[in-house]
Image (cartoon, grey):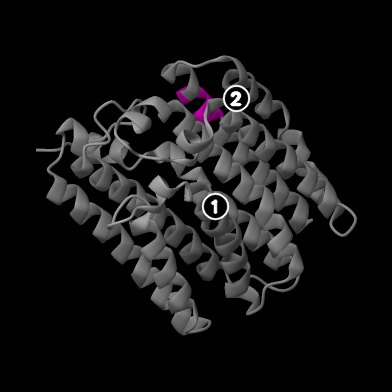
Amino acid sequence: MTSAANWFQGARPRTLGAAVSPVVVGTAVASRYGDLVWWRAAFCLLLAIALQVGVNYANDYSDGVRGVDTQRRGPVRLTASGLAAPAHVKRAAFGSFAVGGVLGIVLAVAVDWRLVIVGAVSILAAGLYSGGPKPYASSGLGEVMVLVFFGFVATCGSAYVHLQRVPWLAVAAALPVGLLACAILLVNNLRDVDSDRDVGKRTLAVRVGKARTRTLYRGCFALSALTVVALAPRAPGALLALAAAPLAMAPLRTVATETGAPALVQALIGTARLQLVLSVLLAVGLAL
């Protein structure tokens, strides 16, 4: 029987900051234009976490049954390690998506029925990341989809549920959040590039090679900082996010100089920490 601790680790809790960050920023943007509806903010947060947990379990299941997780380092893999039956992991993924779906329907009823379409597309994208006949993670599109859904869709959607519109600031503020989410995936795939290549999983890192993956990783950091600076003329408080810059030093140095999986796992954790702290500081600055 799979323990609660195994299920918790299988949900990859260290990745949940990528779900929280866009909701925090989008909600802060909304606060500049009108009053917040706090239960909607809470539902957005729970919805984002449910979808993140769902995609983590779905990835665990799909990669496990395809046999591409056997040499993977990092968080526990329930399916590949045999800690949980594949059917149970699949059920956990569907359960998480169902929770997210219910929360999304409640928001749609309260705000706009078109949100049902956004939610359905988001769940479909989560399931097809590593599942389905042609997983887009193996087509080198993982980072693009992360930018779209963990950046623009989540941030703009979190603003929309309060305002019933998407202000330009929500779109602009989504970019640094989404870019750092891309950086998390880049360092994850850099860590796994050799094992992914061996099993035919052609992530972006496999396609462009380690050196270019490192360049893309640095580019995500640089462009996210530049975007924050670009927000300053209209939202000076956004510059508060740059106080997170010292947290970038360790993961940047590790990705540039280290090749071992344990070091890159720490870089991944550091990148996730940076994204969350930068997003919280950006949210505070935007709300001022």
Q: Earlier in the sequence, mark 1 or mark 2?
A: 1
> Which residue position is annotated with label 2?
251
Tags 1 and 2 in contact by the CB under 8 Å rule? no
Relative side of 124 to 94, left or right: right
At x 71% / y 34%, what residue is drawn? 244
Relative side of 257 to 61, left or right: right
At x 33% / y 49%, what residue is drawn? 130
Quarter containing the N terminus:
top left
Amino acid identity at mark 2: Pro
Task: Give the number of marks.
Answer: 2
**Where on the picture, by quarter, is residue 239?**
top right
Tell me the element at label 1. Answer: helix
Residue 176 in percent (x, y) is at 68, 48
**Where on the picture, by quarter, is residue 2?**
top left
Crowdedness near tag 2: few (<14), some (14–19) or many (≥20) residues, C-alpha within 10 Å: many
> Which residue position is annotated with label 1?
144
Tell me which segment is drawn in magenta: 265-270
Residue 154 in percent (x, y) is at 55, 61
At x 42% / y 29%, what residue is drawn? 193
Judge whether residue 217 can be spotted in this image. Answer: yes
Tell me the element at label 2. Answer: helix
* For residue 33, above or below residue 51: below
Q: Which of the pair 251/26 is nearer the observer?
A: 251
* For residue 157, above or below residue 183: below
Q: Which of the pair 204/172 is nearer the observer?
A: 204
Crowdedness near tag 1: few (<14), some (14–19) or many (≥20) residues, C-alpha within 10 Å: some
At x 47% / y 84%, what residue is drawn? 113
Q: Which mark is residue 253?
A: none
In three-dimensional space, the C-alpha distance between marks 1 and 2, rounded to whole angstroms, equals 21 Å
